[in-house]
Image (cartoon, rainbow, N blue to C red):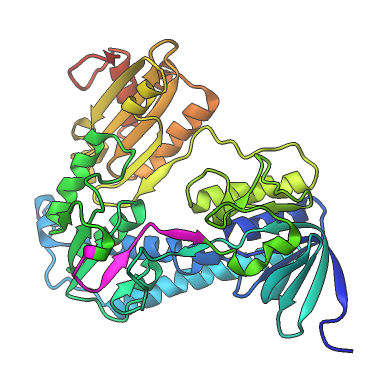
Amino acid sequence: MVVGDVTTAVDVLVLGGGPAGYVAAIRAAQLGRQVTLVDPVPPGGTCLHRGCIPLKALLTASERYAELRRETLEPLGIRLIGVDFDWGRLQAWKASIVARLAEGVRRLLAGNRVQYVAGRAWFLSPEEVRVESEQGERFKFEHCLIAVGAEAEPPPGLDYDGRTVLTPEQALELAELPETLAVAGTDYVALELTTLFARLGVRVQLCLPGEELLPGIERAALRPLQAGLRQLGVQVIGNLPPERVETRPLVVCGGLRPRTAGLQLEAAGVSCDARGAVRVSPSLQTSVARIYAAGDCAAAGAPPLASVAIKQGKVAAEALCGRRVQFAPLALPRVVLTSPELASVGYTAPEAERAGYRVKTGRFPLGANGRALMLGGEAGMVLVVANAEDESILGMTIVGPRAGELITTGVLAIEMGATLTDLAELLYAHPGLAEGLLESAEGALGQAIHVLGRATSG
């Protein structure tokens, strides 16, 4: 008998150990299913091992370094001499955080009795998968979740070589900091990479394929970001697609392709779109009833964010367990850890008007917020967009310290159908950044206390 001839029956088979896959495996196990997770690499996915977590860790370190600059602290009466950084030790610290979180994922899977198999999988039929592993195995499943994620796709005319043209993940693994660096893209990854390297003294060119920075963000909110980039010495160049950028090394951001090419989905009868993304229903079921898909490899109409993948993993696991659930969030937050930080959720005012709403807006400058002044965030603001008919919250944008944490209030407001009055009637801690939410809501109601102006309606 050849090793691998024996087929093992499994209850739920999860292909991919990223945020969608490992979360789905744990949720299905919590619901009483026996789960096997297959991935060529240890669970955690790109987000944990090479993407979001490493980037945010280095951004946090670079922010602390920037705060220690003499010109930043002298107004506070603090003088520091000889502040420097060690890129190698920063990388080691980043790796320690990744390792600790990866071990946490491993323990969670083991604690929930999820079996992990290291190997590359592909479909043999709508109910059977072959895994290339040390033993060589076949699994016949009752249900399967495809959560293999996506990978960077170079633009036409460019190839990633790891030296001169880099993926964002490769840029985070540079052994030495270059003197100059070009970043091509308009998404949050491009802005965060630009911020990271510029804070550490690299001369950065941010090359936009068009003229717009962060499409879909309130225009007023972008002005502090643009000012922050100028203060960091970043050169922003518009209308320069990646293939025309001459500076090297060049980091190209934004292009992703689902990692489905080797899965032999045609053998399972699973339908995909032209990009290779798996077509799914609102419950994340594919064209084959027993097979589901979640995360960056699924054509679910959502952006490639870890938060989306985590939620989809939970929905898919609950759906394949027989629960009546759908992936249908009303509010999806976007966070950019730039200088200053930016976060948004829901509609901008122009988007709301195009959707047919008559809007009421409020704006509060954080220069009038005591806590923001203490944290150096006087250039920030809080913008709120509401339906003029019933005052329900339609969108919120925050620029300033801790914007990524504060935006959760906006998410909750939209999901719960809260109104401007609901926000204005809450009692907020003082002095606190969250008072900016109170003041923006009161501004939209024409009741602003700490800023002059009246609400605007459209």
- Which residue shows up at 64% across the image and 60% down it? 22
Q: Residue 238: horizontal and vertical position, in percent? A: 18, 51
Towards the viewer: 143 or 414: 143
**241 shown above or below 106:** above
Q: Residue 424: horizontal and vertical position, in percent? A: 38, 19
- Which residue shows up at 73% across the image and 45% down it? 318
State which quarter of the image contains the N terminus: bottom right
Towards the viewer: 228 or 271: 271
**What span is in magenta?**
244-257
Q: Residue 253: horizontal and vertical position, in percent? A: 35, 60
Q: Residue furthest top?
A: 389
**264 shown above or below 41:** above
- Residue 56: which quarter of the image? bottom left
Number of numbered discs overlaid on the protein picture: 0
- Which residue shows up at 11% across the image and 61% down it? 70
**Residue 60 on the magenta span:** no
